[in-house]
Structure formats: C-alpha cells, structure tokens
Amino acid sequence: MSKAAAVATGRGDAIGTRGGGGGGGAGAGGASSSHPARGVAKATKDTKDAKDTRKHAESLEGIGRPLGRAPRVRSVAVTSTNHAWCHNLRRAAFSLALVALVTIGLPAPAAAGPWVPDPGEGYVKVWLKFFHGLAYRSGDGNSYDYGPYNELFLATYGEVGVAENLSLYWQSDILRTFYLHDPSSGETGVHAAPGDPAIGFRYQFLSGGRFVMAAEAWGRIPLANGEAVQPVLSTAPGNPQIGELRIGAGAFDLGAGMSAGYGWDHFYTSVFGSYVLRSQDYDHVIQWTAEGGYGGASGFSIRGRITGYHSLGNGTAPYHDSPSGLGNGTNYVGFAIETDWELWPANWLGVSFEGGLFAVSRQSGGPVISLYWAKRF
C-alpha cells in the first residue's frame, strides 16, 4: 500500500498563527498557524507501487502558528490506496498542504505536520494578510474600544527536503505595517517593520502506512523593534491609555515539538504540540493545533484548524498590552478555515479566514483574511 501525500498548515501561525484576532505574528498559526504548515507525504518503501506513488506526493505549507502561528498552521494529508488514485489526487495533495501560516498574530513555529518533502523537493508560499481590530482584549479579561486599528502583512514560507525524511523550513514576514488611530488627536500612526524570521528542521521518524509522526525544532530571531512605538488610547471619555503598540516580539524563541497525521483517500487529520522557550525572561509557551480537511481530484481543497497559544506564567518580565499580540503574556484559542485551487500546474491560489474562539488576552479581537500563492518544486 502506498503512503500519503500530505501537507501542513499555517502563526501562523504554527510558525505563525492568529486566531483570536490578535495582531502581527510570524506565524505560527498560525498559523495561522500556525503554526504556522507544510508537509509532503512519504510513501512507504516496501513496494514498487509505493515508490512510484512517492513521485506524485506533494509538499506544501499552512495560521499563524504564534511562533505562531502558526502559525503556525498544521498538517494536511491526502492518501491514496493505489498508484492511479495518487495520480488523480496529485494536485489536491499539494493544495491541501497550503496553509495560512498566521492564525493569531503571534510568532509561533510554523508547525506543519509530520510529512516532509523528498530530498531536493519542496514548496514556497507567499501571502498577504489583512487584520481589522475590533476591540482590545486585556489580560484582566475585559474588552476596550480604542478606535480603528489595522495590520497589513506580506509574508513568505518555504520548505525543502535536505535528506531522507528530513526537511529544512523557514518563515518570515517580509513587511509588517500597522495602522493605529489616536482618538485624542484624530491622527493615525503608521508603523512599518520587518518580520522576526524563523528557521527549523523537521524529521519524520515514523511512517506506518497512512499514519506518520515527526519531530521538529526551530528558532526565531527578533529583528523587528521590540519596544513600544505608540500608546493605545481608549475611546472612553478622557481617552485613558489601555496599552502600547508593539511591532516586534523583542525576544528570541527556541521551540521543539511533535506532530502526527493520518490520511484517507480524500480526507486527512493531524495534530501538533510544542514547547517554546523565550528569552528576556518572557513566559514560556505551549502551542497546539488540531486540523482536518478534504481534497478532491479537481484541484479544490478545504480545511479547518483550531490552534492554541498559552503563556505559562513562569517568566519574570512584565506582561505587554499590545493590540498586535506581540510581546509577553499573550494567550488565545483560535480557528482558521482555508480553501485553495490549482489554477495552473504546480501553482495554487488560496484564501483563509481566521478569528478567535475563547481565552483571548493581551491582543486585539477581529477577523483576519489572507490571500496566498504557493508553488511546488
């Protein structure tokens, strides 16, 4: 029996994700991602049919997931029971791997699921993410109106097989732009910055037919300014300050995690979990993603993802109150819905919608819409 062709989410996500609506993220979710997504199916090597099938296995990315985070973003798997099915599902396999890396806005490891590309193969993804802030959700559980706030990010993600069962992946926002209105003066502050790039390795250590597991480790470098760039003022009488806008995390992240996935002929499911160490005495973080989706032979696919990003409260640095969600102490559980199409050979266009579900704190609520292009090589 041949193995799965598969994919992965996704600050967002997990190298990036953004679910709760929170701001910028490298994404791990999202994710969205995540976390935050990639993956290619590894065909089992015990039959010639399996070997042929692997030639058609596609690799691919997805919130947001904070590393995100998302990203980042988790795995999508498409499997076939014979060579013919694998050939018919070739395009769906790759598109299922596309994920929106940002599901919630924090930088997270781009978790992509257990499937990795064959040596020399892989994919790249570029996406444009727009976030519209509705209300700031503080650490005390309250929501505050603070006037118009928007983010526009241009981001990239890629993964390539460097050895048998081993891949190298990277994720970074090329340009982050933040727009924050000041209700006291009526002016809008505009702030631009590069993203905080992340790089990691994924090793697929188990491949049992349709079931696959992998381990991964990554690091993120804080290139963007980690200091506050503008006070966040409430629209309440007197315009009291409720936070400070941050456009960079201001800390190094080092994470490790594991993922598992299972694929049927047209459906897949996968899970991912990781632990993230953060410098500057920030809280350490636990990230997780659960994902499932469908892919058809027509080149169309759709998937859904739930991503969590939880600060553990074990740091000594003060918490940050920023609508972007960047900094220390952010939490959320968010979702992402994605769909994409293969419009021409080995090229996919897609769209994702992301938002928060519950436990969202120290970032802004609001919808996230992403448009993306991905190419397999």
Image: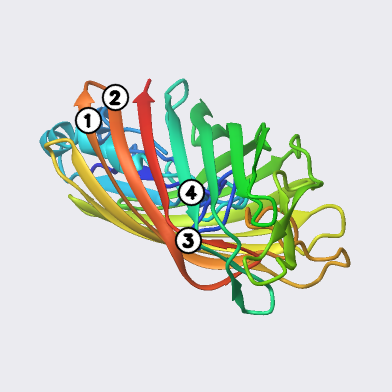
| Structural distance between the alpha carbons of marks 3 and 2 | 26 Å
Residue wearing tag 1: 342
Question: How dense is the environment of label 4, judged by Cα within 10 Å: few (below 14), some, or many (20 and up)?
Answer: many
Q: Amino acid at mark 2?
A: Asn
Q: Position of residue 185 (x, y in %)?
A: 69, 51
Are dots 2 and 4 in contact, CB under 8 Å?
A: no
Are dots 2 and 1 in contact, CB under 8 Å?
A: yes
| Structural distance between the alpha carbons of marks 1 and 4 | 26 Å
Residue 308 vertical position relative to residue 247 in the rendered view, above or below: below
Residue 312 vertical position relative to residue 225 in the rendered view, above or below: below
Q: Nearer the viewer, mark 4 or mark 3?
A: 4
- Residue drawn 68% across the image and 38% down it: 196
| Camera-nearest residue between 103 and 43 | 103
Q: Earlier in the sequence, mark 4 or mark 3?
A: 4
Q: Nearer the viewer, mark 2 or mark 4?
A: 4
Residue wearing tag 3: 289
- Residue drawn 29% across the image and 24% down it: 347
